[in-house]
């Protein structure tokens, strides 16, 4: 696959994740949740302070044939601001999109849900 094609697939997946955040949190506006340009350092999805209050995750997006999920998660942690939960959104070829977060963060979500 040409690098330009791979970048286009990645860009479309980032936009899919951005759109999913916006549809899940209807109070957010498009300027609250932005997809970064390909190759930019840091988080793949940039959130306004208001959006961060609604969705406190730092998203690393991956769209490729195979994954080294620990490496991808390490990248998400490295780009994650303090006090924010790192999360990897990933999608393989002809596969459903999934997310990965630490077990502790997952169970913290369940506890918050019960409250």
Image (cartoon, rainbow, N blue to C red):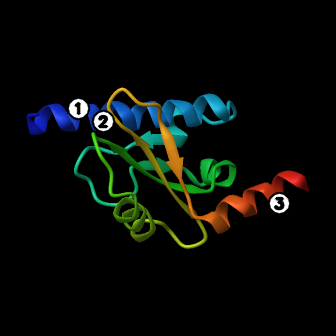
Instruction: Give the residue pinned by disc 3.
Output: 111
Q: Are marks 2 and 1 in contact (CB under 8 Å)?
A: yes
Instruction: Give the percent coordinates (x, y) of residue 16.
Output: 44, 30
Instruction: Give the percent coordinates (x, y) of residue 73.
Output: 43, 62
Instruction: Give the residue pinned by disc 1.
Output: 8
Nearest the viewer among 89 and 82 is 89
Nearest the viewer among 93 and 112 is 93
Q: Is residue 68 above or below residue 99?
A: below
Asked which secondary structure carries label 3, the reply is: helix
Q: Quadrant of the C terminus?
A: bottom right
Q: Nearer the viewer, mark 3 or mark 2?
A: 3
Instruction: Give the percent coordinates (x, y) of residue 75.
Output: 36, 64
Q: Which residue is at a point 52% across and 32% down the rendered structure image?
A: 30
Nearest the viewer among 102 and 58 is 102
Q: Which residue is at a point 74% across and 63% down the rendered structure image?
A: 108
Which of pointers 3 and 2 lies earlier in the amino acid sequence? 2
């Amino acid at each position: 696959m040409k690098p330009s094609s791979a970048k286009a697939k990645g860009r479309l997946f980032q936009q899919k994740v951005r759109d999913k955040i916006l549809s899940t949190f209807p109070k957010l506006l498009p300027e609250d949740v932005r997809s970064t340009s390909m190759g930019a350092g840091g988080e793949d999805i940039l959130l306004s302070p208001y959006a961060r209050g609604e969705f406190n995750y730092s998203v690393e997006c991956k769209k490729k044939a195979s994954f080294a999920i620990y490496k991808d998660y390490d990248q998400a942690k490295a780009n994650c601001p303090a006090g924010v939960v790192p999360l990897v959104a990933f999608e393989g070829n002809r596969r459903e999109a999934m997310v990965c977060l630490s077990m502790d963060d997952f169970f913290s979500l369940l506890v918050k849900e019960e409250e």
